[in-house]
Amino acid sequence: MTSGVPATPQFNFDRQLWRRFTKIAQPYFYPQENRLNFWVFTALLVVLLVAVVCVAFFVVVGGTLLGESLAPNFVNKYAGGLVKQVKALVASPAIFWAVGGLVLSALAFGLTRRAVAPRWKQWSLLGLLLFLSFAVNGANVSLSYIFRFIDTALGQKDQPTFWLNLTLYGGLIIAAIPILVGYRFTRLKLGLYWREWLTKSFLNDYFKDRSYYELDSNSSHTEIDNPDQRITEDIRSFTSVTLSFLLDVLDTILTLISFTAILYTISKPLTYGLLVYATLGTVIALVAGRRLIKINYDQLRLEADFRYGLVHVRDNAESIAFYRGEPQELRQVGRRFGRVVDNFNLLIIWQALIDLFQYGYNYFTRVVPYVIVAPLYFSGQTDLGTITQAYIAFSQVLGALSLVTNQIQQISSFAAGVNRLGAFEEVLSRQGLPVKHPEQQIQIQTAQQLSIQRMTLFTPNSEQELVRDLTVNLAPDERLLIVGASGAGKSSILRAVAGLWTNGSGIVVRPDISEMLFLPQRPYMLLGTLREQLLYPKNDETISNEQLAKVLERVNLAYLTDRFNWDEILDWSMVLSLGEQQRLAFARIFLTQPRYAILDEATSALDVTNERHLYQELQHTAVVYLSVGHRPTLVDYHQKVLELTGGGGWQLLTVAEYRAKLAQMVG
């Protein structure tokens, strides 16, 4: 579905964006029933982080003490400072704080077990991701020290120490690779689970209460363009990017804690200058990012419109070929693509400006550690390895502080996707729909027979009145034929009976929708087997293939069983002619035996002989039907005729009265 290009609001990092983000992201981990639940969810995230920190603390302490006991000389020589710090921590209250953190975490998750227990998988994977992130960060810190020792050994021409640390580097890499692979695998797996859950949630809402139909037909809601893209691409992007940002933020915190401490011990001025520099860069990036969000929002929408134009051509290829409408179709697709190119040109300009800032921001800072630390080395105040470690620590801290600066393009694109998903969710949850009072809607009442009481019907956008004060009362066995000029509103009355169009006033009394079957002019053919086609919209497994074959014979389609087997999956809308599809739709009536059948020009592609045969077969059943059609021959199979005269006018006639009117017009 698509629409014209509406004015797109300027989205910012504002409350609306944050509200939409939390409303989409939170329910997967914790139900969002009220505002309090948001704070409970936030507290649980903090508690989970505390638990992971405590577990990591015990792993580091245990690993260090175990290493000292197994290789005391080696560990004390190359990690003596770490051993001393670990032993000091064990002797301090830190050990009790760590135990207390684990107890607090267990208590918090225990108190919220009703909400958390059904979501144990996502919380477990998230906790594992956090722990692996700690492990990756710890490996980076270890590498900085190893490279320091390697460069110092090179400067001192100490071969044994050089080769020993190079061996340590190889061992650390071998140990780190499974951690890195596990980290990536866990992140992708959690993202897949999240996407699966969120997609199913959106699909349930999309098909609930015919929302898919309302978004496709109701012009007052066409600001929700391309719902298919929002469910497929936007959800996929949302889940993967959200996890990436969450873990990047955590990694930023860990990096700042670990490498800032290293950098501070090397040079205090370097640390302070870096903090100021990174803060200014972040502010500039945020200002530029506000403009990028709107451009990325437009790009997502325009790309989807362009793709829809091509899908429309594919779905109507035969009609376009008959009309030889290639030039017009090329123009409409070209216009859509032109808007894509124009907006992308604007996106390129802004990305170039941001790239100019980012490259200067990143390349200029590479020389800073050398400028500040090199004089210390030349004066003999530090060793050569310190310069390498300072550069590594400086780069890590700068990367952490520059998270927004370096990813502003991805963040702006992500924010645009969040707004698209958020707007879609609001409409599906009916928050985005205009509230209609009961007197502005056609009311549906359930009864055993069909009648319409003083119904006034408008198009969904209220631009045209189709029928005014329509009243039709049918006896239990009366069949009604609706006739009138094209565009008078014949099919629209059927939509009102089905409850699809409710814009207006009055009452429609009908059986429950499950007791009615609607046959449009072009029957819906799902991608499935011949058996599934016949049983649609249900799939009654108790009906045998022999019974289906008898029904096919009843609608003059017995030859289909010779051409196709029952379990062959085909695109039946392409395999069968329109006339065959209409006869197959009648077979659905004979199989389901609804109380009422609504036939919207359901025999328009059939010859008069086949039409007469189908209606005669239908008259032999207990099914009461309403028909829309133009052929005079249809009058023979009905008892009343509703003629729409245009401008909201109508006449309800008996078959005899309608025939007399036709005869008078001919005469």
Image: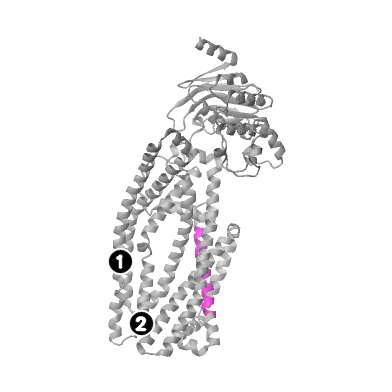
Main SS of residues in magenta: helix
Q: Amino acid at mark 2?
A: Thr
Q: CA distance from mark 2 to mark 1?
A: 24 Å
Q: Please identify the quarter of the rendering in which residue 583 is found.
A: top right
User: On the image, numbered disc 1 is attached to which residue?
Assistant: 361
For the N terminus, give its image quadrant.
top left
The image shows residue 578 at horizontal and vertical percentages of 55, 33
The image shows residue 242 at horizontal and vertical percentages of 46, 59
Q: Please identify the quarter of the rendering in which residue 555 is found.
A: top right
Of residues 332 and 218, the one drawn nearer to the viewer in this rendering: 332
Q: Amino acid at mark 1?
A: Tyr
Of residues 348 and 274, the one drawn nearer to the viewer in this rendering: 348
659 is higher (above) or lower (below) than 190: above
527 in magenta: no
State which region is magenta: 39-62
214 is higher (above) or lower (below) than 421: above
Q: Residue at x 40, y 71 (%)?
A: 256
Dot placed on the residue nearer the N-terminal end, 2 or 1: 1
The image shows residue 581 at horizontal and vertical percentages of 58, 34
Please give left or right for residue 447 compared with residue 520 in the image. right
User: On the image, numbered disc 2 is attached to which residue?
Assistant: 386
666 is higher (above) or lower (below) than 504: above
Please give left or right for residue 108 compared with residue 341 in the image. right
Q: Residue at x 47, y 52 (%)?
A: 233
